[in-house]
Image (cartoon, rainbow, N blue to C red):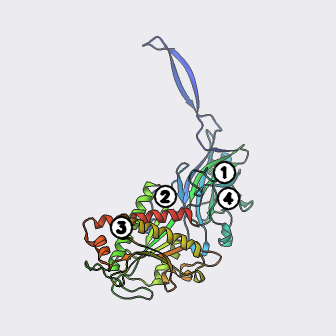
Amino acid sequence: MVITAARILYRTIASSSTSPVSNKVRKEVRIDRPRDVLHLDPVALAPQILDEDERPVEGSTEPHAIPYKHPMVKVAPQTNRIAHRELKLRVWSEGRPDNHHQGKTVTWSMAPLFVPPGEEGQPALDPVFRGSWVHAVAEQRDRFTAPDELSAVGFTRLSQEYATTSVDETGHTAIRVNLAPVAFNAARISVQLEGSAAAVDVIDLEVPGIIVIDPGHGGTQNKPGSSANNATSHTSGVLEKQLTLDFGLRTKSALRALRTNENRNVRIHLTRPDDENKAGIARAKVSREAGADILLSIHFNGANGIARGTETLIRPRNDNVNFTEDTALAERINDATYGAILAHDAGARNRGVKSERQLAVLSDSELGNTVNYHLLRAALLEVEFIDHQAVDELLSINSGYEQVRQDICDAIAVALLEDLRCNQ
């Protein structure tokens, strides 16, 4: 049996002397805290969380009560292939000295929290773990390992699923928790103190979803796999590189708003936040080193001033180790973008998902994907043909074009979050 950790209070009702005001017997409530009431309190987390700009997040080492999901971290994700967080626990009893439980064994266990998306109208599915520990570096394939930053004594591996530590002389113990580095993979951590009748839930941990937005082109110099600019708008003269950056920034803002509104553990990175060009492999490297789940490269088409429509590109099947997952991502993004444009323009056209080999930013070798390990999905969105007059008017000229742009980016953001939940 597992119970939720809580401070146990005993209330006693005592009669007092007659109230001088009402002649009624006054009842007083006295809250007693008897000796030996056990507490298992999370008191610290490590390492400190950094935001997308590598700035420390204030308060990120302070544990919160269940069901708050504390984010985990990915360190050298392509090498370690694991997400982790360290937890320090205080073990104490009411009215006893700090070292009262010194030397006692604490047994650590976990239960999954991620609920897979189910069919509408059907009962919710049981929670599961996402991904697998088997791909991790050998020393981190267990769910619990000895911590590196926090102090712990007596760590003992029982199995892949369980471990024990000992309470030190200050009444503390600590552990490192490991989970497969898949977006929203989550666990509830439980502990049982030697001599106690039940385990106690102490904290929830979750792997954040990581999305990299790649605004295509940029700058004034061509780079390998990335020209400074390709398409130019029909009448307004707005350049593709300007639109891709605008759409990238808007999509990042939309994702941040969803993160707040839906209380999601999501991190969003841009390959370029300004007018700078980067080589295709450099853009892929941003995703690889961030341990991203998704890379979306945003572009706009140009042709003969007649063609139009939305299309999304992925690497072909014979050159793509996660072709099925990339296809699912591309379809979500393409349909969302087309739908948002269609809501403003009946002339919108859905050109679908297509394969394209010559896209360095989508290269599996540069993304770090292998046949046996390929968590990073990637697609290149061609929003529309900006050399078409109607498209240029829609996106850059007509009154309300700013809202059109935002509606498209909002739809893209929703599709990206949906892919994090559904596509593995």
Distance from Cα at disc 2 to Cα at disc 3: 34 Å
Q: Are marks 3 and 1 in contact (CB under 8 Å)?
A: no
Q: Which of these two is toward me, 83 or 62? A: 83
Residue 329 disc label: none
Residue at label 4?
153
Q: Determine whether the residue tagged by mark 1 lies in a helix, strand or loop.
A: strand
- Where residue 202 sits in the image (x, y, percent)? 60, 50
Residue 346 disc label: 3
Q: Amino acid at mark 1?
A: Val
The image shows residue 157, relative to residue 353, as above or below, that is above
Distance from Cα at disc 4 to Cα at disc 2: 34 Å
Are there few (<14), some (14-19), or many (20+) residues within 10 Å of tag 4? some
Classify residue 409 by image quadrant: bottom left
What is the residue that sits farthest to the top in this orientation?
Answer: 23
Residue plotted at (49% across, 73% down): 295
Residue 191 disc label: 1
Residue at label 2?
264
Q: Amino acid at mark 2?
A: Arg
